[in-house]
């Protein structure tokens, strides 16, 4: 039987990981459509070869074999695990973790295969990531600030953002490409669409209303961006409803940070 369970990461990873999950396929293969999120992901089939999915700029369709148990980690933009290259070299690519981490990945595969349950395997993977981040140092604080400013609900001009951070627009672009994989403008558009999906997950009333709430000029603007980022119209993507994507998965853990920011930014300001 197919199943998908998404949850928040361990507290020690809350500043770098958006969500983690466990996915199981039944007796038939499952077609999975991966969408741009602004971050990278680790896909780790238990007993198989783990992969890093680089920053996506469009949809990636994957066929997951039957009787597969997979654990996954989705990182926040600009907070990829330690890698031997900059992220703009990994855009729209799927790479073997063994090629990126060498023997470290091999040891992790062995440890994950010994885990008695998928839940234990996911904890082991997260514990490994905690150790990696502690030894690698801090995430670039300027990129962290830029990502926060580019989140939905609070439109930010790229030139104004660069000036606020004490950078030129070209410097911001270069640092964003290296640490995130895409330009600030592309990241902003991706995060805006993620905001739309967060509101859809929360059960908003209509696609037209969502497009305005999230910052699109109108519903047509949303539809164009949806086609660009997912290869589908909003109706196709959401399965004819606005309370869940057509894959049937509950992504509320992944979208909780977007909804919290939406509530915060829409709350009346005290004067």
Image (cartoon, grey):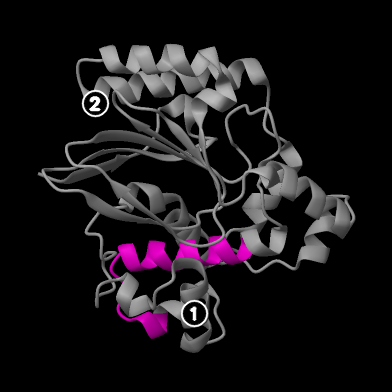
- Looking at the rendered structure, the secondary structure element under dot 2 is helix
Q: Main secondary structure of the magenta part?
A: helix
The part of the chain drawn in magenta is 188-209
Q: In percent of the image, x 40 and y 61: which residue is there?
A: 198
**Visible residue check, residue 70:** yes
Q: How far apart, in angstroms, are the residues tagged by discs 1 and 2? A: 37 Å
Q: In the image, 111: left or right of 230?
A: left
Q: In the image, 93: left or right of 45?
A: right
Q: Is residue 92 magenta?
A: no
- Badge 1: few (under 14), some or many (20 or more) residues near its Cα, within 10 Å? many
Residue 153 on image: x %, y %: 55, 67
Q: Nearer the viewer, residue 113 or 115?
A: 113
For the image shown, how many numbered marks are present on the structure? 2
- Badge 2: few (under 14), some or many (20 or more) residues near its Cα, within 10 Å? many
Quadrant of res 245: bottom left
Q: Nearer the viewer, residue 11 or 238?
A: 238
Q: Earlier in the sequence, mark 1 or mark 2?
A: 2
Residue 180 on image: x %, y %: 66, 46
Q: In the image, 50: left or right of 160?
A: left
Task: Give the position of the C terminus as an image quadrant.
Answer: bottom right
Quadrant of res 151: bottom right
Q: Which residue is mark 2?
A: 118
Question: In the drawing, what numbered circle is on residue 222?
Answer: 1
**Visible residue check, residue 212:** no
Relative vertical location of residue 103 with respect to residue 167 in this rendering, above or below: above
Q: In percent of the image, x 68 and y 44: which residue is there?
A: 89
Residue 99 on image: x %, y %: 56, 26
Question: In the drawing, what numbered circle is on residue 68?
Answer: none
Q: Nearer the viewer, residue 5 or 164?
A: 5
Residue 164 on image: x %, y %: 83, 55
Q: In the image, 158: left or right of 265?
A: right
Tell us which disc is closer to us: 1 or 2: 2
């Amino acid at each position: 039987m197919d199943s998908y369970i998404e949850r928040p990461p361990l507290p020690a990873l809350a500043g770098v990981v958006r969500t983690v999950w466990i996915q199981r396929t039944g007796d038939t293969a499952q077609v999975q459509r991966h969408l741009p999120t602004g971050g990278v992901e680790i896909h780790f089939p238990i007993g198989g070869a783990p992969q890093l999915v680089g920053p996506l700029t469009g949809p990636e369709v994957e066929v997951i074999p039957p009787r597969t148990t997979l654990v996954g980690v989705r990182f926040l933009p600009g907070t990829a695990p330690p890698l031997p290259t900059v992220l703009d070299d990994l855009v729209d690519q799927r790479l073997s973790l063994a090629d990126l981490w060498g023997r470290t990945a091999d040891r992790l595969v062995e440890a994950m295969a010994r885990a008695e349950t998928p839940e234990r395997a996911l904890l082991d993977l997260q514990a490994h990531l905690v150790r990696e981040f502690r030894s690698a140092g801090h995430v670039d604080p300027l990129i962290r600030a830029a990502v926060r400013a580019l989140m939905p609900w609070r439109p930010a001009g790229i030139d104004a953002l660069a000036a606020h951070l004490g950078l030129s627009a070209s410097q911001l672009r270069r640092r964003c490409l290296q640490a995130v994989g895409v330009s600030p403008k592309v990241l902003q558009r991706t995060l805006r669409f993620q905001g739309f999906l967060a509101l859809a997950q929360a059960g908003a009333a209509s696609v037209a209303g969502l497009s305005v709430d999230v910052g699109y000029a109108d519903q047509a603007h949303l539809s164009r961006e949806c086609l660009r980022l997912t290869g589908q119209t909003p109706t196709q993507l959401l399965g004819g409803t606005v309370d869940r994507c057509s894959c049937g998965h509950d992504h509320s853990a992944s979208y909780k940070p977007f909804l919290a920011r939406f509530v915060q930014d829409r709350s009346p300001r005290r004067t």
